[in-house]
C-alpha cells in the first residue's frame, strides 16, 4: 500500500501540462509546448539523503484517446528506462492521465487551472485499490486541495529567470480505512511557467497509519535545461 500511495502523490506533485493539436503539428499552449522533439531535463534531489538523480521528458509526435479525451504523449527517460506520459489541456484546465501500477485503474489529475487567481482553490479525489486487502474491493481515497499562492511573478531556476509564473500549493489528505487511521502532513508547492510547464517542485509529505510512519518524502525537482521547438 505504501508504494501505491507514494506513486499517487508523487504523480500529483510532479505532473506538467500540455495541449493537443494535430499529431506532429507544432503547438504551444499557455503552460506547455507539445511540438515533437521539445525536451526538458530535470534534476531531483532527495533532501533527506542529498541523493541526486535526473530524468528527461521529450514530446513525441503521437496522441491517444482515452475515455473520449485526447492526450498528447510524452516520453520520460531515467536510469530505469523510458515510459510514456499522457497530458491534456482542455480550455483552462490541465490534466495528466496515469496508471499507478499494472492492474490498477488509471487516474486523471486536474493539477492546474490557469484562470484561478491568488487565493482560489479547486479539489479532487482519487480512489486507489488497496492491494492484498482482507476486505475485497477496499479502496484508498486520496483527497487533494489545490490553491493558487502566487501568480504573475518571476522565479530564477538554475540560473534562468522565468516570468508569469504560477505557484500552486497542494494539500493532501488520505481517508481512514477499516481498522486503520491515516494522518498526513504535506508541504507541496509546484511552479509553472508559460511554454515550459513545471519548472520547480517542492514535495514534502509525511503520512502515518495508526501511528506508524508509512511515508516520509522530501524532494525538490528543478528544470535544469530545455529545448523548446
Image (cartoon, rainbow, N blue to C red):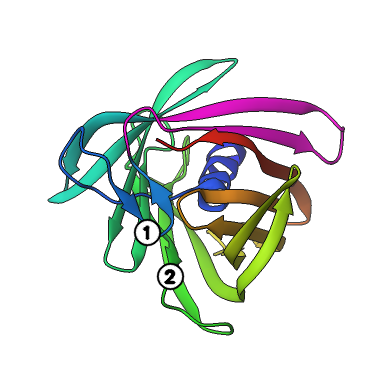
Quadrant hosting residue 176? bottom right
**Residue drawn at x 60%, y 62% as measured from the top left:** 163
Q: Which residue is mark 1?
A: 94
Q: Does residue 51 appear left or right of residue 127 in this picture?
A: right
Relative to 155, does residue 120 appear above or below in the rendering?
Answer: below
Q: Which residue is mark 2?
A: 114
Spatial separation of the CA atoms under disc 1 and disc 2: 8 Å
Closer-to-camera residue (144/188): 188
Instruction: Determine if the magenta segment contains residue 71.
Output: no
Crowding near the residue tagged with mark 1, few <14, some 14–19, many ≥20 C-alpha atoms within 10 Å? many
Which quarter of the rendered picture does the C terminus lie within? top left
Q: Which residues are magenta?
A: 35-58
Q: Secondary structure at mark 2?
A: loop
**Residue drawn at x 18%, y 35% as measured from the top left:** 23
Dot in front, 1 or 2 = 2
Crowding near the residue tagged with mark 2, few <14, some 14–19, many ≥20 C-alpha atoms within 10 Å? some
Instruction: Determine if the magenta segment contains residue 37.
Output: yes
Q: Does residue 68 appear left or right of residue 81 in this picture?
A: left
Mark nearer the N terminus (1 vs 2): 1
Q: Secondary structure at mark 1?
A: strand
**Residue drawn at x 77%, y 48% as measured from the top left:** 213
Q: Is residue 138 visible?
A: no
Residue farthest toward the left in the current orientation of the protein = 68
Which quarter of the rendered picture does the N terminus lie within? top right
Question: Residue 91: horizontal and vertical position, in percent?
Answer: 27, 67
Quadrant hosting residue 217? top right
Quadrant hosting residue 33? top left
Question: Residue 71: horizontal and vertical position, in percent?
Answer: 25, 44
Amino acid at each position: 500500500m505504501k508504494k501505491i500511495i507514494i506513486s499517487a502523490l508523487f504523480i500529483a506533485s510532479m505532473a506538467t501540462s500540455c495541449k493537443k493539436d494535430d499529431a506532429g503539428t507544432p503547438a504551444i499552449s499557455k503552460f506547455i509546448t507539445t511540438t515533437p522533439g521539445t525536451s526538458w531535463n530535470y534534476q531531483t534531489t532527495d533532501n533527506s539523503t542529498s541523493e541526486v538523480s535526473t530524468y528527461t521528458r521529450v514530446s513525441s509526435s503521437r496522441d491517444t484517446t482515452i475515455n473520449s479525451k485526447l492526450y498528447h504523449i510524452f516520453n520520460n527517460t531515467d536510469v530505469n528506462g523510458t515510459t510514456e506520459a499522457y497530458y491534456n489541456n482542455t480550455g483552462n484546465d490541465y490534466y495528466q492521465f496515469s496508471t499507478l501500477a499494472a492492474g490498477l485503474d488509471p487516474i486523471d489529475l486536474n493539477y492546474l487551472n490557469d484562470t484561478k487567481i491568488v487565493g482560489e482553490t479547486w479539489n479532487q479525489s482519487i480512489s486507489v485499490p488497496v492491494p492484498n486487502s482482507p476486505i475485497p474491493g477496499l479502496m484508498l481515497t486520496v483527497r487533494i486541495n489545490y490553491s493558487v499562492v502566487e501568480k504573475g511573478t518571476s522565479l530564477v531556476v538554475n540560473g534562468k529567470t522565468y516570468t508569469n509564473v504560477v505557484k500552486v500549493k497542494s494539500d493532501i489528505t488520505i481517508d481512514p480505512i477499516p481498522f486503520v487511521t491515516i494522518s498526513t502532513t504535506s508541504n507541496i508547492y509546484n511552479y509553472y511557467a508559460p511554454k515550459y510547464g513545471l519548472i520547480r517542485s517542492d514535495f514534502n509529505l509525511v503520512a502515518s497509519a495508526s501511528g506508524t510512519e508509512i511515508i516520509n518524502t522530501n524532494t525538490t525537482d528543478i528544470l535544469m535545461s530545455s529545448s523548446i521547438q
